């Protein structure tokens, strides 16, 4: 069993989740994920890692409450225990000194892009971080990201902070700042990663996305997390989760992401979890 150290809602519908897991904390790296179960009857779900403390033996993730499983996680309190916290899983993000790197985060990816930006900065890169949300009240960890970035950019769709608009404003924002990135790394929802990849492709900016397909075991055995990359089938859990965003078959991926929406939402409607929204 794994002890919950912290579980709190940091902005509406997004939760900071810290678990005591010394073996995971000892070897986790930027870009890794963990597989979690909220209880003995719960399903296994992947969560990107947002931070860790090797000395304390803790690992932190940010998750969005969207269905029955994440609703169960959102009901946990410090001191509670969960039966599964498996990791670190996946291949870590490649960290090299390439020059100018743009790190893009949205939703839970604002958290999971933090260790990536931190490692890239430590490797000697110029790190520029861009975070995006519908409104300023959905932003978090800005101080943390600013501390590991040469400059922090913000886009909000309603214009309450930073640049008004959507993530497709990214090329325009970089042009005004005089920044040409040698590498773009994106963590966040599927639509954001797809939008950034489409915006950077004509510019020739290498773009790495941290994919978030449906998973079960997280070790390449079940095949549920398969996706097409450059015309070849890959498993996100063992071949990724980082992939070249310009090589992803996004239409196929979006369709596969919808596969179990009714099955995930229906138990939430029929359970006591609904009272916690």
Image: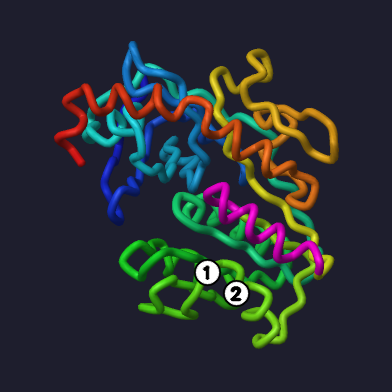
Residue visible at 22% across and 22% down?
Answer: 270
* Residue holding disc 1: 166
Image quarter where the N terminus lies is top left
Residue at position x 35%, y 46% from top? 16
Q: Tell me, yes or no, whether the two marked residues, 2 and 1, touch with CB atoms within 8 Å.
A: yes
- Is residue 200 one of those drawn in magenta? yes
x and y, in percent, of residue 160 in the image: 36, 78
Q: Position of residue 18 (x, y in %)?
A: 37, 39
Element under label 2? helix
Reply above or below: 49 against 201. Answer: above
Q: Which secondary structure lies at badge 1?
A: loop
The percent position of residue 97, horizontal first and vertical second, equals 79, 62
Magenta region includes residue 243:
no
Highlighted range, magenta: 187-202
Name the disc covering residue 169, or none.
2
Q: Is residue 246 above or below residue 179?
A: above
Left or right for 86, reference 128? left
Q: Nearer the viewer, residue 83 or 277?
A: 277
* Image quarter of residue 173: bottom right
Residue 108 placement, left or right of 39: right
Residue 208, position in %: x, y? 72, 52
Measured Cα–Cα span from mark 2 to mark 1: 6 Å
């Amino acid at each position: 069993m794994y002890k919950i150290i912290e579980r709190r809602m940091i902005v509406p519908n997004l939760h900071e989740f810290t678990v005591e897991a010394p073996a995971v904390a000892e070897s986790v790296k930027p870009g890794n994920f963990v597989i979690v179960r909220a209880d003995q009857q719960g399903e296994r779900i992947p969560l990107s890692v947002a931070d860790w403390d090797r000395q304390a033996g803790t690992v932190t993730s940010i998750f969005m409450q969207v269905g029955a499983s994440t609703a169960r996680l959102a009901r946990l309190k410090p001191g509670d225990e969960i039966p599964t916290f498996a990791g670190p899983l996946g291949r870590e993000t490649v960290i090299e000194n390439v020059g100018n790197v743009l790190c893009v985060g949205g939703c839970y990816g604002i958290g999971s892009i933090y260790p990536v930006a931190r490692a890239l900065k430590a490797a000697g890169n110029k790190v520029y971080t861009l975070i995006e949300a519908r409104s300023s009240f959905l932003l978090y960890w800005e101080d943390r990201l600013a501390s590991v970035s040469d400059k922090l950019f913000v886009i909000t769709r309603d214009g309450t902070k930073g640049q008004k608009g959507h993530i497709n404003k990214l090329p325009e924002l970089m042009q005004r700042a005089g920044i040409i990135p040698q590498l773009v790394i994106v963590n966040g929802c599927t639509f954001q990663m797809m939008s950034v990849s489409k915006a950077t492709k004509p510019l020739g900016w290498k773009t790495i996305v941290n994919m978030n397909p449906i998973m079960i075991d997280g070790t390449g055995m079940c095949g549920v997390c398969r996706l097409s990359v450059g015309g070849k089938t890959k498993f996100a859990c063992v071949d990724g989760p980082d992939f070249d965003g310009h090589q992803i078959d996004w239409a196929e991926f979006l369709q596969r992401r919808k596969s179990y929406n009714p099955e995930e939402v229906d138990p939430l409607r029929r359970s006591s979890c609904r009272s916690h929204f």
